[in-house]
Image (cartoon, rainbow, N blue to C red):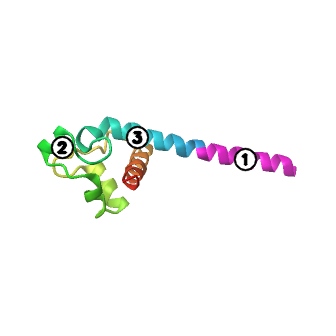
Amino acid sequence: MGMKRMEMAIVVLMLGLAANAAHAQSMGEIVYKAKCQSCHGSNGAAETSVAKTLGVKPLNALLVKMSETTMTNVVLNGSGKMPAFKDKLSDFQLKALIAYVDELQEKK
């Protein structure tokens, strides 16, 4: 493979990786809005009426104490009044969701 072709292949690969990361992020947002937002709120602040009724704490207060592994286990198996999503999310959706929640908390 010539140098120009190799450079082009690297550029195409990098664009593909960037597109995949953007897709994962948007998938995380989609999953969050569908499965989490009604209780945790659009920004994770737990300011919804459902959150107040159920006593849901803001995500930033919960996640400070959680490793990624623990957060994954909570999403999969549920916790307290939070339902389990083990059979409702693909591995890709789960990873995208965790990444989105992390990013959501970094915006605060």
- 101 left or right of 22 in image: left
Q: Give the residue at the far right of this rendering.
A: 2
Q: Give the residue at the far left of this rendering.
A: 53
Q: Amino acid at mark 1?
A: Val
- 60 left or right of 16 in image: left
Q: Magenta stretch?
A: 1-18
Rounded to the nearest angstrom, the CA distance separating label 3 from label 1 is 27 Å
Dividing the picture into quadrants, the one containing residue 41 is top left
Q: Residue 73, position in %: x, y?
A: 30, 55
Disc with the residue nearer the chain's start (3 vs 2): 3
Q: Residue 108, position in %: x, y?
A: 36, 54
11 vs 50, nearest the viewer:
50
Rounded to the nearest angstrom, the CA distance separating label 3 from label 2 is 19 Å
Q: Residue 97, position in %: x, y?
A: 39, 46
- 14 left or right of 44 in image: right
Q: Residue at x 37, y 50 (%)?
A: 101
- 90 left or right of 15 in image: left
Q: Residue 6, position in %: x, y?
A: 80, 50
Determine which residue is flagged by label 2. Answer: 51
Determine which residue is flagged by label 1. Answer: 11
Local secondary structure at mark 2:
helix
Local secondary structure at mark 1:
helix
Disc with the residue nearer the chain's start (3 vs 1): 1
